[in-house]
Image: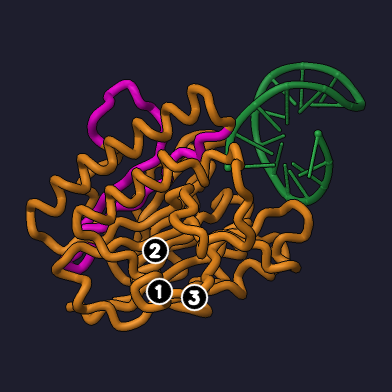
Chain colours: A orange, B green
Amino acid sequence: MRIATFNINNVVKRLPNLLAWLEAERPDVVCLQETKAPDALFPAQALEAAGYGAVWKGERTYNGVAILARGATPVPTRRALPGDPADAQSRYIEAAVNGVLVGCLYLPNGNPQPGPKFGYKLAWFDRLIAHAGELLATGVPVVLAGDYNVVATDLDIYRVKPLTTDALQQPQSKAAYRRLLDQGWTDAVRALHAGEQVFTFWDYFRDAWGRNAGMRLDHLLLSPVLAPRLRAAGVDAWVRGDAGASDHAPAWAELDWP
DNA sequence: ATGTCATCCGATGGATGA
């Protein structure tokens, strides 16, 4: 099973890009973020025609997540991250696909920092860690995939800028990601590319793609049952170079499953 | 501080988020 995560940055606007990538790479499972479409406008029919069943949770203009499965329909288990009923932002969806529980997440960006948005980011991270711990306790195979909006280490950014105010690089953000990993999750791309600079995001600003001034923000975390089954992992960086591309490229993990 | 891309509201651009 090959599972991918892709911040599509508007699934309606970039449907041609999404379909081109699906046809070229044929991932089995896809987690999408920033679909930026209300549920009624999610392009389910076009994806079905491309061979993918889907579950989605969107909203107008912002956020929005979805899980696709090739030749199957994911069985939804959640459409929100537990822990705050007042949180109306569409940032988490979870579904079972071929015996794997897939959590698809879009962690808050958190800028500007400091401020209420950064507070929301850290609170959301705490809720994710709590939920992830409960998933681990069940012992079922889980992949938590998405845009974590964190530069985890200095290796995950093209150039370290000391004393930056960027919410993605704050010590609290990095510490939260570290706490999540320390529960027992395996960062699939990092596990197979230790010490290598691998990026999943290149800003639209300042020709970041042309200069390879990227960051690694999109991750697939594997629960302990799945970690020994990891066979390959990488990033389909070519997607970022296409016309009308998202500012992210898909990251993926190939699992010996089932 | 800058820069790009896109959307929204509601106006023919400015504010916003990323």
Whether tag 3 and tag 2 are in contact, CB under 8 A, the answer is no
- The Cα atoms of the two marked residues, 3 and 2, are separated by 24 Å
**Residue linked to disc 1:** A27
Position of the N terminus of chain A by quadrant: bottom left
Question: Do circles 3 and 1 both sit on a common chain?
Answer: yes
**Residue linked to disc 3:** A196
| Residue at mark 1: chain | A
- Tell whether position A85 is magenta: yes
- Name the element at disc 2: strand
Check disc 3 and give the amino acid type.
Answer: Glu
Going 32% across and 51% down the picture, which residue do you hit? A178
Q: Earlier in the sequence, mark 3 or mark 1?
A: 1
Check the image and name the residue furthest to the left: A138
Going 48% across and 30% down the picture, which residue do you hit? A118
Question: Do circles 3 and 2 both sit on a common chain?
Answer: yes
Can residue A37 be seen in the rendering of this structure?
no
| Residue at mark 2: chain | A
Going 21% across and 48% down the picture, which residue do you hit? A132
Residue A83: image location, x then y, percent: 24, 30
**Residue linked to disc 2:** A30
**Could you tell whether A178 is left or right of A239 in the image?**
left
Q: Residues within 10 Å of mark 1 (few under 14, many from 20)?
A: many
Judge whether A114 appears above or below A93 on screen.
above
Q: Quadrant of residue A185?
A: bottom left
The one of A163 and A242 positioned closer to us in this rendering = A163
Provide the residue span drawn in magenta.
Answer: A82-111
Check disc 1 and give the amino acid type.
Answer: Pro
Q: Quadrant of residue A4?
A: bottom left
